[in-house]
Image (spheres, grey):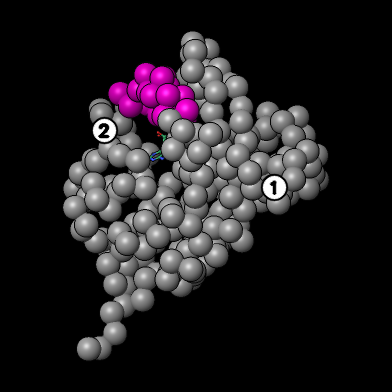
Amino acid sequence: MDDRALQAVNRAWWDERVAACLTGQFYDIDGFLAGRSTADPAGIAAEFAEANVYNAVEVLGRRTFDVVYTSIGSIIWLPDIARWACTVAALLAPGGRFYMAEFHPFSAVLGEEDLTVTDSYFDGGPILSDEPGSYAAAGAKTVNDRSVTWNHRLGTVNRALAQAGLSIEFLHEYPFTLRARWPFLERRADRTYHTPAGSPEVPLPYSVKAVKPAAGPR
Ligand SMILES: C[S@@+](CC[C@H](N)C(=O)[O-])C[C@H]1O[C@@H](n2cnc3c(N)ncnc32)[C@H](O)[C@@H]1O
């Protein structure tokens, strides 16, 4: 299957899981609509556009922005990370800042039961899976269970951003995360999950800031 066909497989997987995201506990949409947001009060007006991210430049009318953000759990769904980075760069105004937070690709090569390395970090090819249900709602009934993901490693992501013309300002790796990736992680009062005291720490999420150079003098 080519990239377009693989993305169609994922579209079917995600479309079926919208209901679970809307009604499940995980996203607490009703709470958000009632004002119980966990985000800091920001006062930023929002406009929502729905599209394949690769079409974002056209869908947003070729406008450019001071800040572009890619949120966690996003790029594993994308086959072509260089094309994603070019999309980010095209959406940024000169001098604009790009931020991303993402699950660390090293955490994806660890097993489901413990911190044993079970997969190759350097593979990079499509990963097919057949998984019913949704992380957003335990027990959700689904039939479109085939999906395909890519574990883009740190070097690949940062090279793509650099080749798209952005300068990396930071890359932070964190030994704690915001969801129970393994049942033995310990939840702290600030809602972060950590490996138990005495066990090895591994990178869980990471974040990047990159900037688009300001336009030079004419
Ligand atoms: C795991 S969710 C992450 C959502 C959010 N970042 C969060 O933290 O809850 C992945 C999202 O990526 C979207 N997605 C997958 N492939 C996409 C694509 N090619 N273009 C746009 N969105 C896509 C899915 O529809 C889904 O909403």
Q: In which quarter of the image is ligand 1?
A: top left
Instruction: Left or right? Give the position of 163 relative to 128.
Output: left
Q: Name the residue under label 1.
A: 123
Answer above or below: position of 203 versus 33.
Answer: below
Which of the two residues, 212 or 37, is positioned nearer the viewer here?
A: 212
Can residue 175 be seen here? The reply is: no
**Which residue type carries mark 2?**
Gly
Instruction: Left or right? Give the position of 72 relative to 37.
Output: right
Which of the two residues, 146 or 192, is positioned nearer the viewer here?
A: 146
State the image coordinates of residue 87 (x, y, percent, origin top left): 36, 56
State the image coordinates of residue 31 (x, y, percent, origin top left): 32, 27
State the image coordinates of residue 86 (x, y, percent, origin top left): 40, 60
Could you give the CA–CA distance between mark 2 and mark 1, rounded to whole angstroms?
43 Å
Instruction: Kindly identify which numbered label has been placed on residue 35.
Output: 2
Residue at 28% in and 53% down: 57
* Circle nearer the viewer, 2 or 1: 1
Instruction: Kindly identify which numbered label has been placed on residue 209.
Output: none
Answer with mark 2 or mark 1, whichever residue precedes in sequence.
2
* Residue range (magenta): 9-30
**Which residue type carries mark 1?**
Asp
